[in-house]
Amino acid sequence: MTNPYAEWFEQLRSEYGEQLGAMPLPEGLPEHLRQLIAQHDEDAIQFIIKLAWQFGAQVGYAAGSRQGATPAANIPSTPRVQA
């Protein structure tokens, strides 16, 4: 049986891998990830992925909810993080 997420990530990698490969990560993050992988710290790696997933979902929701709405300049800023 195949994993739909693995297939989806591979599709994204083939479509956007070159573009994202050129995007630098914040200083120190690649080294930190290598350390987590070497230590087999799956909990920390999953936590990082969950944060990225949550932030991406929030950005996508915000972008979708603003389509056809009042221009962003008129919308009051209410920063929130929901886990």
Image: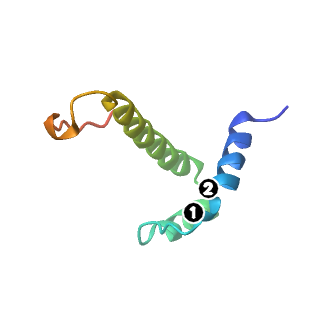
Name the foreground residue: 8 vs 33. Answer: 8
User: What is the crowding at mark 2: few (fewer than 14 residues within 10 Å), some, or many (at least 20)?
Assistant: few
Label 2 – label 1 distance at C-alpha: 5 Å
Residue 53 screen position, x and y as percent: 48, 41
Residue 19 numbered tag: 1
Name the foreground residue: 77 vs 67. Answer: 67
Q: Can you name the residue that lies furthest to the front here? A: 68
Q: Amino acid at mark 1?
A: Gln
Describe the element under mark 1 as helix, strand or loop: helix
Residue 44 screen position, x and y as percent: 51, 50
* In the image: residue 62, left or right of residue 25: left
Describe the element under mark 2 as helix, strand or loop: helix
Residue 61 screen position, x and y as percent: 39, 31
Relative height, residue 72 to residue 29 (above, below): above
Q: Residue at x 71, y 49 (%)?
A: 10
User: What is the crowding at mark 1: few (fewer than 14 residues within 10 Å), some, or many (at least 20)?
Assistant: few
The answer to whether mark 2 and mark 1 are in CB contact below 8 A is yes
Residue 16 numbered tag: 2
Q: Quadrant of residue 59?
A: top left
Relative height, residue 48 to residue 3 (above, below): below
